[in-house]
Amino acid sequence: MEFLLNFLLNYITLSVAGIAFVLILVVLIWKRKTLSGKDKALLIILLAILAIYFGFILIVTITSGSVHPAGGPTPIRP
């Protein structure tokens, strides 16, 4: 589970997903009349998966941004 979260929250994964999202949007808008139905469906499914991924990133960012320890830091060795 830790490996999966490290992969999903990695900056490289996030940037590749962002670039893929923009490229898929451009292809869908630019070639909307020439794409076949199967190709459009595949690109829309990929776009939906990326949107869910970005929603997950947003939720993780919001929920973990307000986590603070109850007390101050305590030294391990006094």
Image: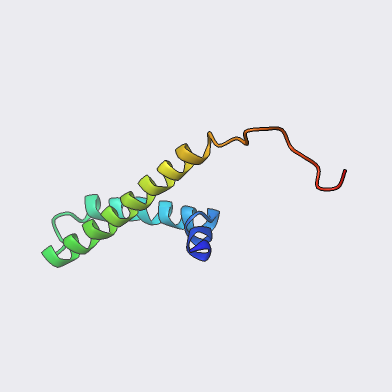
The type of colouring in the image is rainbow
The residue depicted at 21 percent of the width and 64 percent of the height is: 42
Q: Position of residue 71 (x, y in %)?
A: 67, 32
Q: Is residue 13 left or right of residue 33?
A: right
Q: Position of residue 15 (x, y in %)?
A: 48, 53
Count of numbered badges drawn on the protein: 0
Q: Is residue 27 left or right of residue 64?
A: left
The residue depicted at 17 percent of the width and 54 percent of the height is: 32
The residue depicted at 18 percent of the width and 60 percent of the height is: 40
Q: Position of residue 19 (x, y in %)?
A: 42, 53
Q: Is residue 33 left or right of residue 13?
A: left
- Viewer-side residue, 63 vs 8: 63
The residue depicted at 47 percent of the width and 53 percent of the height is: 14
- Viewer-side residue, 25 vs 47: 47
Q: Quadrant of the C terminus?
A: top right
Name of the residue lying farthest toward the front: 78
Q: Position of residue 76 (x, y in %)?
A: 81, 47
Name of the residue lying farthest toward the right: 78
